[in-house]
Amino acid sequence: MLDNKLKLTFSAFLGAVALSMSAPAFAQNAAPAAPAAAEAAAAAPVEAAPAAEAPADPPTMKNAGKLNVGTMFMDSDPVVKVIMIGLSLASILSWTILLTKILEFRALNRVSDAFVENFRSAKSVNDMSKIALAEEYDGNPLADMAAAAAQEIELSRQAGLSIAGEHRDSTMDRASHAVSAVQAALARRLSGGMQYLASVGSNGPFIGLFGTVYGIMNSFIGIANTNTTNLAVVAPGIAEALLATGLGLFAAIPSVIFYNFFQTKISTFGARSEGFVAELMNAISRNLDKGA
């Protein structure tokens, strides 16, 4: 009995040793299968996954890559375009007034210098009238003042009125009124175009600003419609809107400068005409006292 138990125990021990010796070989044969299965499992989703779609490029405005004044004007909204055209025409007219009035004042001062020099050589009221009515002084306001005063005195003489003695003051008053009428016409003549320059100078920036506000409003509407804040999309519309403000300033700034410049010219010539009126009335008074 004892021998049988020993035999069974020894047989179990040999079986355990044999199993332990064969386990590494089994593990070595089974190990390569696991990474291969993992690699196959990992590769399967990659091969099955659909290709991702490329993101669409954001929309861009026409001529966004080559912005300049011409393209910004052509791409602008019709309302903004009308404002820019109006401001451009206003600026052109302002420069036209500048050139016209510069030439006017230059000729006015030149002819006035020649007339005053010749006027001071007159010996009588008739001489004053002849000098003032000379063709080379036609249209000169100083010559017109002298002619108006001399003609009023001549009309009084022709009407049989006494122009000297106790009626001297009445004659001087009538001559002074005739000169005042010429001065009023001179003020209207010299102030021509000044109201326009003042209007453009004061309203030009606001008109341009209206165009800018309208253009930027359209730009934000475009941003909302395209659902993008890409600078390439936003910048062209805003640049076009700001162009309206730039044109408004371009029209307004020269107009303000021209207005101030010509106001000084008008004041200077006005003071000169006042001085000439005093000289004219003194000359008439002397000639009336002499009976000329």
Image (spheres, rainbow, N blue to C red):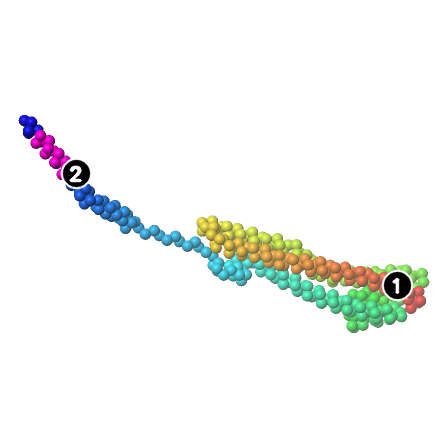
Q: Looking at the rendering, in which quadrant would you find the N terminus?
A: top left
Residue at horizontal 6 percent and vertical 29 percent from the top: 4
Compared across the picture, whether 105 is left or right of 3 comes to right
Q: Contact, CB < 8 Å: mark 2 with mark 1? A: no
Compared across the picture, whether 183 is left or right of 71 comes to right
Highlighted range, magenta: 6-18
Point out residue 268 in the picture as x, y percentages from the top left corner: 77, 61
Q: Amino acid under label 2? A: Ser
- Circle 2 packing at 10 Å, graded few (<14), some (14-19), many (20+), is few
Hey, which quadrant is residue 170 in on the image?
bottom right
* Of the two numbered discs 2 and 1 in the rendering, the one whose residue sits closer to the viewer: 2
Looking at marks 2 and 1 on the same chain, the residue that comes earlier in the sequence is marked by 2
- Circle 1 packing at 10 Å, graded few (<14), some (14-19), many (20+), is few
Tell me, yes or no, if residue 196 can be seen here: no
Hey, which quadrant is residue 250 in on the image?
bottom right
Residue 147, which numbered label?
none
Tell me, yes or no, if residue 14 can be seen here: yes
Main SS of residues in magenta: helix
Which structural element holds mark 2? helix
Q: Which residue is mark 1?
A: 282
Quick one: 121 or 47, which is closer to the camera? Answer: 47
Compared across the picture, whether 174 is left or right of 249 comes to right
Quick one: 4 or 23, which is closer to the camera? Answer: 4
Q: Looking at the rendering, in which quadrant would you find the C terminus?
A: bottom right
Q: Is residue 118 above or below residue 269?
A: below
Q: Residue furthest left?
A: 1
Q: Amino acid under label 1? A: Asn
Q: Which residue is mark 2?
A: 20
Residue at horizontal 80 percent and vertical 70 percent from the top: 114
Q: Is residue 43 above or below residue 272?
A: above
Q: Residue furthest top?
A: 1
